[in-house]
Image (cartoon, helix red, strand yellow):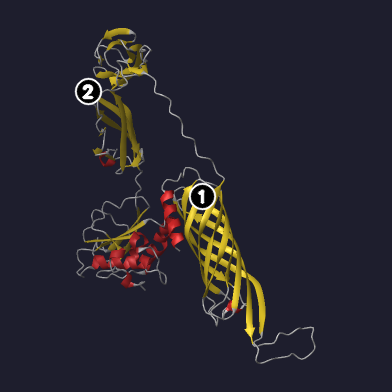
Protein backbone atom coordinates (compact mmCIF):
# COMPACT_ATOMS: atom_id res chain seq x y z
CA UNK A 1 0.00 0.00 0.00
CA UNK A 2 2.86 2.39 0.83
CA UNK A 3 4.44 1.62 -2.51
CA UNK A 4 1.17 2.52 -4.28
CA UNK A 5 0.99 5.88 -2.48
CA UNK A 6 4.58 6.65 -3.44
CA UNK A 7 3.92 5.79 -7.09
CA UNK A 8 0.80 8.03 -7.13
CA UNK A 9 2.74 10.99 -5.67
CA UNK A 10 5.61 10.67 -8.14
CA UNK A 11 3.16 10.35 -11.04
CA UNK A 12 1.23 13.51 -10.06
CA UNK A 13 4.45 15.53 -9.79
CA UNK A 14 5.65 14.21 -13.12
CA UNK A 15 2.28 15.00 -14.78
CA UNK A 16 2.69 18.75 -14.25
CA UNK A 17 5.62 18.72 -16.72
CA UNK A 18 4.10 16.29 -19.21
CA UNK A 19 3.60 17.41 -22.81
CA UNK A 20 -0.07 17.36 -23.84
CA UNK A 21 0.12 18.92 -27.27
CA UNK A 22 -0.86 15.74 -29.14
CA UNK A 23 -3.57 13.15 -28.54
CA UNK A 24 -2.68 9.46 -29.09
CA UNK A 25 -5.32 7.39 -30.88
CA UNK A 26 -4.95 4.16 -28.86
CA UNK A 27 -3.65 2.78 -25.59
CA UNK A 28 -2.89 -0.50 -23.79
CA UNK A 29 -3.58 -0.63 -20.06
CA UNK A 30 -2.13 -3.09 -17.49
CA UNK A 31 -2.98 -2.97 -13.82
CA UNK A 32 -4.08 -4.42 -10.53
CA UNK A 33 -7.71 -5.48 -9.88
CA UNK A 34 -9.60 -5.86 -6.63
CA UNK A 35 -13.21 -7.15 -6.59
CA UNK A 36 -15.57 -7.24 -3.63
CA UNK A 37 -18.12 -9.99 -4.36
CA UNK A 38 -21.54 -9.84 -2.68
CA UNK A 39 -23.34 -13.21 -3.23
CA UNK A 40 -26.27 -12.36 -0.93
CA UNK A 41 -26.85 -15.97 0.17
CA UNK A 42 -25.22 -18.43 2.59
CA UNK A 43 -21.79 -17.52 1.34
CA UNK A 44 -20.72 -14.20 2.93
CA UNK A 45 -19.22 -11.27 1.02
CA UNK A 46 -15.60 -11.93 0.04
CA UNK A 47 -12.71 -10.25 -1.77
CA UNK A 48 -10.70 -11.39 -4.76
CA UNK A 49 -7.47 -9.98 -6.16
CA UNK A 50 -5.88 -10.18 -9.57
CA UNK A 51 -5.01 -8.17 -12.61
CA UNK A 52 -6.38 -7.01 -15.89
CA UNK A 53 -5.71 -5.31 -19.16
CA UNK A 54 -7.53 -3.02 -21.54
CA UNK A 55 -7.18 -1.96 -25.14
CA UNK A 56 -8.52 1.57 -25.70
CA UNK A 57 -9.25 3.18 -29.08
CA UNK A 58 -10.15 6.91 -29.26
CA UNK A 59 -12.46 8.00 -32.09
CA UNK A 60 -12.11 11.71 -31.18
CA UNK A 61 -11.28 13.98 -28.22
CA UNK A 62 -14.04 12.57 -26.01
CA UNK A 63 -15.47 9.30 -27.39
CA UNK A 64 -13.71 5.94 -27.44
CA UNK A 65 -14.15 2.15 -27.26
CA UNK A 66 -12.68 -0.23 -24.64
CA UNK A 67 -11.90 -3.99 -24.62
CA UNK A 68 -11.45 -5.18 -21.01
CA UNK A 69 -10.03 -8.60 -19.92
CA UNK A 70 -9.13 -9.50 -16.32
CA UNK A 71 -9.01 -12.28 -13.72
CA UNK A 72 -9.24 -12.40 -9.91
CA UNK A 73 -8.85 -15.30 -7.42
CA UNK A 74 -9.77 -16.12 -3.83
CA UNK A 75 -8.13 -19.21 -2.16
CA UNK A 76 -10.50 -19.75 0.74
CA UNK A 77 -13.80 -18.00 1.21
CA UNK A 78 -14.38 -17.51 4.95
CA UNK A 79 -13.04 -20.96 5.92
CA UNK A 80 -15.52 -22.73 3.67
CA UNK A 81 -12.66 -24.62 1.96
CA UNK A 82 -13.93 -22.88 -1.18
CA UNK A 83 -11.54 -21.31 -3.70
CA UNK A 84 -12.81 -19.42 -6.75
CA UNK A 85 -11.43 -17.86 -9.91
CA UNK A 86 -13.28 -15.30 -12.10
CA UNK A 87 -12.28 -14.17 -15.60
CA UNK A 88 -14.13 -11.22 -17.23
CA UNK A 89 -14.20 -10.30 -20.93
CA UNK A 90 -16.04 -7.01 -21.57
CA UNK A 91 -16.32 -4.27 -24.23
CA UNK A 92 -18.14 -0.97 -24.57
CA UNK A 93 -17.96 2.83 -25.00
CA UNK A 94 -15.93 5.31 -22.97
CA UNK A 95 -16.46 9.08 -22.61
CA UNK A 96 -13.34 11.06 -21.68
CA UNK A 97 -13.34 14.57 -20.25
CA UNK A 98 -10.48 17.02 -21.00
CA UNK A 99 -8.43 14.32 -22.72
CA UNK A 100 -6.03 16.97 -24.01
CA UNK A 101 -5.21 18.03 -20.41
CA UNK A 102 -2.92 16.39 -17.84
CA UNK A 103 -5.84 15.18 -15.71
CA UNK A 104 -8.55 13.38 -17.72
CA UNK A 105 -11.53 11.78 -15.93
CA UNK A 106 -13.53 9.20 -17.88
CA UNK A 107 -16.81 7.28 -17.65
CA UNK A 108 -17.59 3.95 -19.28
CA UNK A 109 -20.16 1.15 -19.53
CA UNK A 110 -18.86 -2.31 -20.57
CA UNK A 111 -20.85 -5.42 -21.43
CA UNK A 112 -19.84 -9.05 -21.96
CA UNK A 113 -19.41 -12.16 -19.84
CA UNK A 114 -17.67 -13.71 -16.85
CA UNK A 115 -16.22 -17.20 -16.51
CA UNK A 116 -16.24 -18.53 -12.93
CA UNK A 117 -14.84 -21.74 -11.49
CA UNK A 118 -14.99 -23.05 -7.90
CA UNK A 119 -13.33 -25.97 -6.09
CA UNK A 120 -14.71 -27.27 -2.75
CA UNK A 121 -12.95 -29.81 -0.46
CA UNK A 122 -15.29 -31.77 1.92
CA UNK A 123 -13.83 -33.81 4.87
CA UNK A 124 -15.20 -37.14 6.24
CA UNK A 125 -16.33 -38.61 2.89
CA UNK A 126 -14.69 -41.62 1.28
CA UNK A 127 -12.82 -41.33 -1.94
CA UNK A 128 -14.91 -43.28 -4.41
CA UNK A 129 -13.51 -44.78 -7.59
CA UNK A 130 -16.38 -44.93 -10.09
CA UNK A 131 -14.78 -48.05 -11.76
CA UNK A 132 -14.51 -50.01 -8.47
CA UNK A 133 -17.66 -52.06 -7.68
CA UNK A 134 -16.49 -53.16 -4.24
CA UNK A 135 -18.00 -51.56 -1.12
CA UNK A 136 -15.95 -48.62 0.05
CA UNK A 137 -13.64 -49.08 2.97
CA UNK A 138 -14.21 -46.41 5.56
CA UNK A 139 -11.99 -45.92 8.56
CA UNK A 140 -13.79 -43.55 10.90
CA UNK A 141 -10.57 -42.70 12.68
CA UNK A 142 -8.84 -41.36 9.58
CA UNK A 143 -9.88 -38.04 7.92
CA UNK A 144 -11.01 -38.50 4.33
CA UNK A 145 -11.67 -35.57 1.91
CA UNK A 146 -13.39 -35.18 -1.48
CA UNK A 147 -13.02 -32.17 -3.89
CA UNK A 148 -15.93 -30.89 -6.01
CA UNK A 149 -15.23 -28.69 -9.08
CA UNK A 150 -17.84 -26.49 -10.82
CA UNK A 151 -17.66 -23.79 -13.51
CA UNK A 152 -19.98 -21.68 -15.71
CA UNK A 153 -19.95 -18.67 -18.09
CA UNK A 154 -22.64 -15.97 -17.68
CA UNK A 155 -23.48 -12.37 -18.57
CA UNK A 156 -21.57 -9.57 -16.82
CA UNK A 157 -21.29 -5.79 -17.06
CA UNK A 158 -19.52 -2.87 -15.42
CA UNK A 159 -20.43 0.82 -15.15
CA UNK A 160 -18.20 3.45 -13.59
CA UNK A 161 -15.22 5.67 -14.20
CA UNK A 162 -11.71 6.61 -13.32
CA UNK A 163 -8.92 9.19 -13.63
CA UNK A 164 -5.99 9.14 -16.07
CA UNK A 165 -2.93 11.33 -15.32
CA UNK A 166 -0.75 12.10 -18.35
CA UNK A 167 2.96 11.44 -17.64
CA UNK A 168 4.34 11.95 -21.13
CA UNK A 169 3.38 11.34 -24.73
CA UNK A 170 3.69 7.54 -24.39
CA UNK A 171 2.38 6.86 -20.88
CA UNK A 172 -0.35 7.79 -18.43
CA UNK A 173 -1.00 6.65 -14.87
CA UNK A 174 -4.38 5.57 -13.53
CA UNK A 175 -4.42 5.90 -9.71
CA UNK A 176 -8.07 4.94 -9.33
CA UNK A 177 -10.90 3.34 -11.29
CA UNK A 178 -14.12 2.25 -9.58
CA UNK A 179 -16.91 0.25 -11.29
CA UNK A 180 -20.19 -1.31 -10.36
CA UNK A 181 -19.66 -4.98 -11.38
CA UNK A 182 -22.80 -7.06 -12.19
CA UNK A 183 -22.51 -10.88 -12.57
CA UNK A 184 -25.26 -13.45 -13.18
CA UNK A 185 -23.61 -16.62 -11.77
CA UNK A 186 -26.21 -19.20 -10.71
CA UNK A 187 -24.76 -22.71 -10.29
CA UNK A 188 -21.53 -21.79 -8.48
CA UNK A 189 -21.53 -21.87 -4.67
CA UNK A 190 -20.88 -18.11 -4.71
CA UNK A 191 -24.09 -17.58 -6.67
CA UNK A 192 -26.09 -17.05 -3.48
CA UNK A 193 -29.84 -16.91 -3.25
CA UNK A 194 -30.23 -14.52 -6.22
CA UNK A 195 -29.53 -15.07 -9.91
CA UNK A 196 -27.34 -11.95 -9.99
CA UNK A 197 -24.62 -10.38 -7.83
CA UNK A 198 -24.02 -6.65 -7.28
CA UNK A 199 -20.24 -6.36 -6.85
CA UNK A 200 -17.67 -3.55 -6.64
CA UNK A 201 -14.43 -3.45 -8.66
CA UNK A 202 -11.37 -1.23 -8.00
CA UNK A 203 -8.35 -1.07 -10.28
CA UNK A 204 -5.15 0.96 -10.78
CA UNK A 205 -2.36 0.75 -13.30
CA UNK A 206 -0.47 2.23 -16.24
CA UNK A 207 -1.60 2.94 -19.82
CA UNK A 208 0.88 2.84 -22.70
CA UNK A 209 -0.12 5.31 -25.42
CA UNK A 210 0.61 5.10 -29.13
CA UNK A 211 -0.63 6.51 -32.44
CA UNK A 212 -1.66 10.12 -33.16
CA UNK A 213 0.48 12.96 -34.46
CA UNK A 214 3.89 13.72 -33.08
CA UNK A 215 4.44 17.04 -31.32
CA UNK A 216 5.30 19.91 -33.57
CA UNK A 217 9.01 20.57 -33.24
CA UNK A 218 9.94 23.91 -31.73
CA UNK A 219 11.01 26.27 -34.47
CA UNK A 220 14.46 27.67 -34.16
CA UNK A 221 14.37 31.44 -34.00
CA UNK A 222 16.85 32.91 -36.45
CA UNK A 223 18.92 35.81 -35.27
CA UNK A 224 17.17 39.16 -35.64
CA UNK A 225 18.44 41.14 -38.63
CA UNK A 226 19.83 44.63 -38.19
CA UNK A 227 17.14 47.19 -38.88
CA UNK A 228 16.51 50.90 -38.78
CA UNK A 229 13.37 53.03 -38.44
CA UNK A 230 12.49 55.37 -41.29
CA UNK A 231 11.07 58.89 -40.64
CA UNK A 232 7.60 57.64 -41.51
CA UNK A 233 7.86 54.95 -38.80
CA UNK A 234 8.61 51.98 -41.07
CA UNK A 235 11.38 49.55 -40.03
CA UNK A 236 13.71 48.46 -42.86
CA UNK A 237 17.06 46.71 -43.19
CA UNK A 238 19.89 48.78 -41.79
CA UNK A 239 21.64 48.86 -45.17
CA UNK A 240 18.50 49.73 -47.21
CA UNK A 241 17.20 53.17 -48.11
CA UNK A 242 13.81 54.25 -46.79
CA UNK A 243 11.39 53.95 -49.79
CA UNK A 244 8.49 56.29 -50.38
CA UNK A 245 5.03 55.12 -49.40
CA UNK A 246 2.06 54.59 -51.71
CA UNK A 247 -1.00 56.34 -50.29
CA UNK A 248 -4.48 54.78 -50.37
CA UNK A 249 -6.43 57.97 -50.96
CA UNK A 250 -10.18 58.62 -50.98
CA UNK A 251 -12.50 61.65 -51.02
CA UNK A 252 -15.43 62.18 -48.61
CA UNK A 253 -18.23 64.69 -49.34
CA UNK A 254 -20.91 65.57 -46.79
CA UNK A 255 -23.49 65.17 -49.58
CA UNK A 256 -23.37 63.96 -53.16
CA UNK A 257 -26.59 65.80 -54.19
CA UNK A 258 -27.17 69.49 -53.39
CA UNK A 259 -29.51 72.26 -54.51
CA UNK A 260 -28.36 75.45 -56.15
CA UNK A 261 -27.06 77.88 -53.55
CA UNK A 262 -25.94 75.19 -51.05
CA UNK A 263 -22.35 74.22 -50.17
CA UNK A 264 -20.63 70.86 -49.62
CA UNK A 265 -17.57 70.19 -47.40
CA UNK A 266 -15.07 67.85 -49.10
CA UNK A 267 -12.15 66.19 -47.24
CA UNK A 268 -9.48 63.62 -48.23
CA UNK A 269 -9.54 60.17 -46.66
CA UNK A 270 -5.90 59.40 -45.69
CA UNK A 271 -4.28 56.56 -43.73
CA UNK A 272 -2.86 57.20 -40.27
CA UNK A 273 0.63 58.66 -40.36
CA UNK A 274 0.20 60.43 -43.71
CA UNK A 275 1.25 63.96 -42.82
CA UNK A 276 3.37 66.80 -44.15
CA UNK A 277 1.47 66.63 -47.43
CA UNK A 278 0.49 69.23 -50.02
CA UNK A 279 -3.02 69.29 -51.52
CA UNK A 280 -4.35 70.46 -54.87
CA UNK A 281 -8.14 70.53 -55.40
CA UNK A 282 -9.88 70.61 -58.78
CA UNK A 283 -13.42 70.81 -60.17
CA UNK A 284 -13.93 69.04 -63.50
CA UNK A 285 -10.12 69.00 -63.90
CA UNK A 286 -9.61 72.75 -63.24
CA UNK A 287 -7.46 73.62 -60.16
CA UNK A 288 -9.51 75.67 -57.70
CA UNK A 289 -7.95 75.46 -54.23
CA UNK A 290 -5.12 74.23 -52.01
CA UNK A 291 -5.33 73.07 -48.45
CA UNK A 292 -6.35 70.00 -46.41
CA UNK A 293 -10.11 70.63 -47.03
CA UNK A 294 -12.28 72.18 -49.74
CA UNK A 295 -15.75 73.76 -49.76
CA UNK A 296 -17.67 73.19 -52.99
CA UNK A 297 -20.05 76.11 -53.64
CA UNK A 298 -23.05 75.98 -56.02
CA UNK A 299 -24.33 79.57 -56.06
CA UNK A 300 -23.11 80.32 -59.59
CA UNK A 301 -23.16 76.80 -60.99
CA UNK A 302 -25.67 75.36 -63.45
CA UNK A 303 -27.51 72.17 -62.57
CA UNK A 304 -25.53 69.05 -63.47
CA UNK A 305 -22.81 66.69 -62.22
CA UNK A 306 -19.40 67.98 -61.13
CA UNK A 307 -16.25 65.92 -60.45
CA UNK A 308 -14.33 67.18 -57.41
CA UNK A 309 -10.78 65.78 -57.16
CA UNK A 310 -7.68 66.13 -54.98
CA UNK A 311 -4.00 65.33 -55.54
CA UNK A 312 -1.67 64.85 -52.56
CA UNK A 313 2.17 64.82 -52.46
CA UNK A 314 4.89 64.62 -49.83
CA UNK A 315 8.59 63.97 -49.23
CA UNK A 316 8.05 60.42 -47.97
CA UNK A 317 5.04 59.56 -50.15
CA UNK A 318 4.36 58.93 -53.80
CA UNK A 319 1.77 61.27 -55.38
CA UNK A 320 -1.85 60.04 -55.24
CA UNK A 321 -5.16 61.31 -56.65
CA UNK A 322 -8.85 60.63 -55.97
CA UNK A 323 -12.19 62.23 -56.85
CA UNK A 324 -15.92 62.08 -56.16
CA UNK A 325 -19.04 63.17 -58.08
CA UNK A 326 -21.41 65.85 -56.75
CA UNK A 327 -24.75 66.58 -58.49
CA UNK A 328 -26.22 70.11 -58.42
CA UNK A 329 -30.04 70.03 -58.66
CA UNK A 330 -32.32 72.83 -59.92
CA UNK A 331 -35.47 74.04 -58.16
CA UNK A 332 -38.72 72.33 -59.23
CA UNK A 333 -42.01 73.75 -57.87
CA UNK A 334 -44.57 71.35 -56.35
CA UNK A 335 -46.56 69.33 -58.88
CA UNK A 336 -48.93 66.48 -58.29
CA UNK A 337 -52.26 64.78 -58.80
CA UNK A 338 -55.62 64.84 -57.03
CA UNK A 339 -58.25 62.11 -56.73
CA UNK A 340 -61.89 61.96 -55.57
CA UNK A 341 -63.36 58.70 -54.34
CA UNK A 342 -66.00 58.11 -55.49
CA UNK A 343 -65.82 60.33 -58.54
CA UNK A 344 -69.63 60.15 -58.99
CA UNK A 345 -72.11 60.84 -56.17
CA UNK A 346 -75.82 61.42 -55.70
CA UNK A 347 -76.93 64.87 -54.63
CA UNK A 348 -76.36 65.17 -50.88
CA UNK A 349 -73.63 62.49 -50.72
CA UNK A 350 -69.92 62.99 -49.93
CA UNK A 351 -66.62 62.06 -51.65
CA UNK A 352 -63.16 61.58 -50.07
CA UNK A 353 -60.32 63.69 -51.51
CA UNK A 354 -56.60 62.86 -51.72
CA UNK A 355 -53.63 64.54 -53.38
CA UNK A 356 -49.93 63.77 -53.86
CA UNK A 357 -47.29 66.41 -54.64
CA UNK A 358 -43.58 66.24 -55.47
CA UNK A 359 -40.99 68.98 -55.76
CA UNK A 360 -37.25 69.60 -55.59
CA UNK A 361 -35.05 72.00 -53.65
CA UNK A 362 -37.99 73.84 -52.10
CA UNK A 363 -37.95 72.27 -48.66
CA UNK A 364 -40.77 70.28 -47.10
CA UNK A 365 -44.05 70.32 -49.07
CA UNK A 366 -47.00 71.07 -46.79
CA UNK A 367 -50.17 68.97 -46.60
CA UNK A 368 -52.60 69.75 -49.45
CA UNK A 369 -55.78 71.83 -49.08
CA UNK A 370 -58.89 71.58 -51.30
CA UNK A 371 -61.39 73.97 -52.92
CA UNK A 372 -64.63 73.16 -54.82
CA UNK A 373 -66.30 75.14 -57.62
CA UNK A 374 -69.66 74.30 -56.00
CA UNK A 375 -70.80 72.52 -52.89
CA UNK A 376 -68.53 72.61 -49.80
CA UNK A 377 -65.23 71.17 -48.48
CA UNK A 378 -64.83 69.83 -44.94
CA UNK A 379 -61.17 68.84 -44.45
CA UNK A 380 -60.60 66.17 -47.10
CA UNK A 381 -64.35 65.56 -47.75
CA UNK A 382 -66.45 67.09 -50.56
CA UNK A 383 -70.13 67.59 -49.59
CA UNK A 384 -72.51 67.80 -52.58
CA UNK A 385 -75.45 69.08 -50.53
CA UNK A 386 -75.05 72.68 -51.74
CA UNK A 387 -74.87 71.87 -55.49
CA UNK A 388 -77.74 73.72 -57.25
CA UNK A 389 -80.08 72.08 -59.83
CA UNK A 390 -83.10 73.30 -61.86
CA UNK A 391 -86.02 73.01 -59.45
CA UNK A 392 -88.55 72.95 -62.32
CA UNK A 393 -86.91 69.95 -64.01
CA UNK A 394 -88.17 66.63 -62.66
CA UNK A 395 -85.93 64.60 -65.01
CA UNK A 396 -82.48 63.33 -63.94
CA UNK A 397 -79.85 66.12 -63.81
CA UNK A 398 -76.01 65.90 -63.70
CA UNK A 399 -73.43 68.53 -62.82
CA UNK A 400 -69.59 68.33 -62.80
CA UNK A 401 -67.87 70.02 -59.84
CA UNK A 402 -64.14 70.92 -60.14
CA UNK A 403 -61.97 70.15 -57.09
CA UNK A 404 -58.66 72.05 -56.81
CA UNK A 405 -55.86 70.77 -54.51
CA UNK A 406 -53.07 73.14 -53.41
CA UNK A 407 -49.71 72.38 -51.73
CA UNK A 408 -46.88 74.82 -50.94
CA UNK A 409 -43.13 74.49 -50.31
CA UNK A 410 -40.81 77.25 -49.09
CA UNK A 411 -40.87 79.04 -52.46
CA UNK A 412 -44.18 78.51 -54.30
CA UNK A 413 -47.58 76.82 -54.40
CA UNK A 414 -48.48 73.90 -56.68
CA UNK A 415 -51.98 72.94 -57.79
CA UNK A 416 -53.74 69.84 -59.11
CA UNK A 417 -57.38 69.33 -60.10
CA UNK A 418 -59.93 66.56 -60.29
CA UNK A 419 -63.71 66.48 -60.75
CA UNK A 420 -66.78 64.97 -59.10
CA UNK A 421 -70.01 64.32 -61.03
CA UNK A 422 -73.08 65.05 -58.91
CA UNK A 423 -76.34 63.37 -59.99
CA UNK A 424 -79.84 64.46 -59.01
CA UNK A 425 -82.25 61.64 -59.82
CA UNK A 426 -85.55 62.15 -61.60
CA UNK A 427 -88.44 63.15 -59.32
CA UNK A 428 -90.89 60.27 -58.88
CA UNK A 429 -94.40 61.71 -58.32
CA UNK A 430 -96.73 60.06 -55.81
CA UNK A 431 -99.95 58.40 -57.12
CA UNK A 432 -103.29 59.74 -55.82
CA UNK A 433 -106.05 57.13 -55.35
CA UNK A 434 -109.76 57.83 -54.63
CA UNK A 435 -110.58 58.97 -51.10
CA UNK A 436 -112.10 56.55 -48.56
CA UNK A 437 -115.32 58.29 -47.44
CA UNK A 438 -117.09 58.06 -44.02
CA UNK A 439 -120.54 58.99 -42.59
CA UNK A 440 -120.62 61.84 -40.08
CA UNK A 441 -118.89 61.08 -36.74
CA UNK A 442 -118.08 57.55 -37.96
CA UNK A 443 -114.63 55.94 -38.49
CA UNK A 444 -115.65 52.50 -39.80
CA UNK A 445 -114.28 51.67 -43.28
CA UNK A 446 -117.29 50.66 -45.39
CA UNK A 447 -117.25 48.16 -48.24
CA UNK A 448 -116.63 50.84 -50.91
CA UNK A 449 -113.58 52.07 -48.99
CA UNK A 450 -112.31 48.50 -48.65
CA UNK A 451 -112.57 48.08 -52.43
CA UNK A 452 -110.26 51.08 -52.87
CA UNK A 453 -107.75 49.70 -50.31
CA UNK A 454 -107.97 45.98 -51.16
CA UNK A 455 -108.28 46.22 -54.92
CA UNK A 456 -106.98 49.47 -56.38
CA UNK A 457 -104.16 50.05 -53.84
CA UNK A 458 -103.26 46.34 -53.89
CA UNK A 459 -102.31 46.49 -57.58
CA UNK A 460 -99.77 49.27 -56.91
CA UNK A 461 -98.26 47.42 -53.91
CA UNK A 462 -97.86 44.20 -55.90
CA UNK A 463 -96.09 46.04 -58.77
CA UNK A 464 -93.73 47.92 -56.37
CA UNK A 465 -93.45 45.95 -53.05
CA UNK A 466 -91.01 48.49 -51.51
CA UNK A 467 -93.19 51.52 -52.21
CA UNK A 468 -94.79 53.58 -49.43
CA UNK A 469 -98.53 53.98 -48.66
CA UNK A 470 -99.60 57.36 -47.21
CA UNK A 471 -103.00 57.64 -45.40
CA UNK A 472 -104.17 61.16 -44.40
CA UNK A 473 -107.27 61.38 -42.13
CA UNK A 474 -109.65 64.42 -42.52
CA UNK A 475 -112.90 65.55 -40.87
CA UNK A 476 -115.57 68.15 -41.67
CA UNK A 477 -116.11 71.18 -39.49
CA UNK A 478 -119.51 69.94 -38.25
CA UNK A 479 -118.15 66.65 -36.78
CA UNK A 480 -117.65 66.56 -33.00
CA UNK A 481 -116.18 63.07 -32.24
CA UNK A 482 -112.71 63.20 -30.65
CA UNK A 483 -109.63 61.92 -32.60
CA UNK A 484 -111.94 61.07 -35.49
CA UNK A 485 -109.37 61.91 -38.20
CA UNK A 486 -106.66 59.72 -36.63
CA UNK A 487 -109.07 56.82 -36.00
CA UNK A 488 -110.21 56.88 -39.67
CA UNK A 489 -106.55 56.77 -40.85
CA UNK A 490 -105.61 53.95 -38.40
CA UNK A 491 -108.68 51.84 -39.36
CA UNK A 492 -107.67 52.24 -43.02
CA UNK A 493 -104.10 51.20 -42.13
CA UNK A 494 -105.41 48.09 -40.34
CA UNK A 495 -107.19 47.01 -43.56
CA UNK A 496 -103.90 46.89 -45.49
CA UNK A 497 -101.50 45.64 -42.70
CA UNK A 498 -103.46 43.07 -40.61
CA UNK A 499 -102.63 40.22 -43.02
CA UNK A 500 -105.62 38.08 -41.93
CA UNK A 501 -108.99 37.40 -43.56
CA UNK A 502 -109.46 39.76 -46.51
CA UNK A 503 -106.88 42.26 -45.19
CA UNK A 504 -103.54 42.85 -46.92
CA UNK A 505 -100.12 42.33 -45.28
CA UNK A 506 -98.26 45.50 -46.27
CA UNK A 507 -95.36 46.00 -43.77
CA UNK A 508 -96.34 48.63 -41.21
CA UNK A 509 -92.94 50.30 -41.70
CA UNK A 510 -94.03 51.13 -45.29
CA UNK A 511 -97.30 52.79 -44.19
CA UNK A 512 -97.23 56.48 -43.15
CA UNK A 513 -100.18 57.96 -41.20
CA UNK A 514 -101.12 61.66 -40.85
CA UNK A 515 -104.26 63.22 -39.31
CA UNK A 516 -104.55 66.99 -39.92
CA UNK A 517 -108.31 66.85 -39.16
CA UNK A 518 -110.43 69.60 -40.76
CA UNK A 519 -107.31 71.17 -42.31
CA UNK A 520 -107.34 69.85 -45.88
CA UNK A 521 -103.87 71.37 -46.66
CA UNK A 522 -105.13 72.44 -50.10
CA UNK A 523 -105.68 68.84 -51.30
CA UNK A 524 -108.78 68.53 -53.53
CA UNK A 525 -111.46 65.85 -53.11
CA UNK A 526 -111.28 62.58 -55.05
CA UNK A 527 -114.50 60.80 -54.09
CA UNK A 528 -114.59 58.48 -57.13
CA UNK A 529 -117.32 55.86 -57.17
CA UNK A 530 -117.77 55.91 -53.36
CA UNK A 531 -119.76 59.19 -53.32
CA UNK A 532 -123.07 57.33 -53.07
CA UNK A 533 -121.86 54.94 -50.31
CA UNK A 534 -122.33 57.53 -47.54
CA UNK A 535 -125.37 59.68 -46.52
CA UNK A 536 -125.58 63.17 -47.97
CA UNK A 537 -124.98 66.10 -45.65
CA UNK A 538 -124.57 69.83 -45.96
CA UNK A 539 -122.94 70.94 -49.17
CA UNK A 540 -119.19 70.30 -49.14
CA UNK A 541 -119.14 68.15 -46.00
CA UNK A 542 -119.36 64.64 -47.48
CA UNK A 543 -116.04 64.82 -49.31
CA UNK A 544 -114.36 66.32 -46.22
CA UNK A 545 -115.14 63.19 -44.15
CA UNK A 546 -112.40 61.13 -45.74
CA UNK A 547 -108.96 59.44 -45.73
CA UNK A 548 -106.65 60.54 -48.53
CA UNK A 549 -104.91 57.51 -50.11
CA UNK A 550 -101.47 58.00 -51.73
CA UNK A 551 -98.94 55.49 -53.12
CA UNK A 552 -95.33 56.73 -53.30
CA UNK A 553 -93.19 54.56 -55.65
CA UNK A 554 -89.73 53.46 -54.49
CA UNK A 555 -87.36 56.44 -54.65
CA UNK A 556 -90.19 58.97 -54.74
CA UNK A 557 -90.90 61.79 -52.29
CA UNK A 558 -93.92 62.09 -50.02
CA UNK A 559 -96.60 64.56 -51.14
CA UNK A 560 -95.76 68.09 -50.05
CA UNK A 561 -99.16 68.38 -48.35
CA UNK A 562 -98.38 65.55 -45.89
CA UNK A 563 -97.19 66.82 -42.49
CA UNK A 564 -96.62 65.34 -39.03
CA UNK A 565 -96.68 61.81 -40.42
CA UNK A 566 -95.61 58.66 -38.52
CA UNK A 567 -94.99 55.07 -39.54
CA UNK A 568 -97.80 52.67 -38.65
CA UNK A 569 -95.22 50.47 -36.89
CA UNK A 570 -94.81 53.24 -34.30
CA UNK A 571 -98.55 53.35 -33.54
CA UNK A 572 -101.11 50.91 -32.09
CA UNK A 573 -102.41 49.71 -35.47
CA UNK A 574 -101.71 46.03 -34.78
CA UNK A 575 -104.26 45.97 -31.96
CA UNK A 576 -107.10 46.85 -34.34
CA UNK A 577 -106.89 43.57 -36.25
CA UNK A 578 -108.59 43.12 -39.60
CA UNK A 579 -111.79 45.31 -39.62
CA UNK A 580 -115.06 43.50 -40.47
Give the number of the disc on residue 411. 2
Question: Is 331 placed left or right of 17 in the picture?
Answer: left
Quadrant location of the C terminus in the rendered image: bottom left
21 relative to 436, above or below = above
Q: Is residue 541 visible?
A: yes
Residue 304: image quadrant is top left
Question: Residue 298, position in %: x, y?
Answer: 26, 15
| Real-space CA distance between mark 2 and mark 1, rounded to the nearest whole angstrom | 90 Å
Q: Residue at x 19, y 63 (%)?
A: 477
Say whether disc 2 or disc 1 marks the residue closer to the N-terminus.
1
Q: Which mark is residue 171?
A: 1
Q: Nearer the viewer, mark 2 or mark 1?
A: 1
Examine the image and state in which quarter residue 265 appears: top left
Instruction: Pick whichever, 56 or 131, lies toward us.
Output: 131
Where in the figure is residue 192, as x and y percent of width and height?
Answer: 57, 79
Task: Please tell me which residue lies in front, 159 or 226.
Answer: 226
Q: Secondary structure at mark 2?
A: loop
Labels in figure, total: 2
- Direction from residue 46 to residue 142 in the image, left or right: right
Amino acid sequence: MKKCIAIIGVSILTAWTAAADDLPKAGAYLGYQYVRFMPGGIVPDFSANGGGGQFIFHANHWLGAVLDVGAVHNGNISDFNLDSTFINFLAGPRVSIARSKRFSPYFQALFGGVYGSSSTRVLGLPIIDPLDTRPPLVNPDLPVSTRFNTSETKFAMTAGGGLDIRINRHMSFRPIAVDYYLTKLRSLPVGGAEDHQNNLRYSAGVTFLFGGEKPTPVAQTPPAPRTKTCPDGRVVNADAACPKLDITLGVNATSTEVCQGETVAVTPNLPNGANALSYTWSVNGQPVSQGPTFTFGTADRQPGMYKVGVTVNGNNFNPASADTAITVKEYLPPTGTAQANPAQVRAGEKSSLTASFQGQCGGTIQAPTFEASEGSIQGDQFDSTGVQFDANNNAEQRKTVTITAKAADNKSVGTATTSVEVIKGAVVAPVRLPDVLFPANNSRVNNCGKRILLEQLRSYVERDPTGTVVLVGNTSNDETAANLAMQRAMNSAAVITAGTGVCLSVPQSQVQISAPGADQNGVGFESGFCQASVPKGPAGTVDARRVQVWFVPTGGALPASVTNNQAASAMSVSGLGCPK
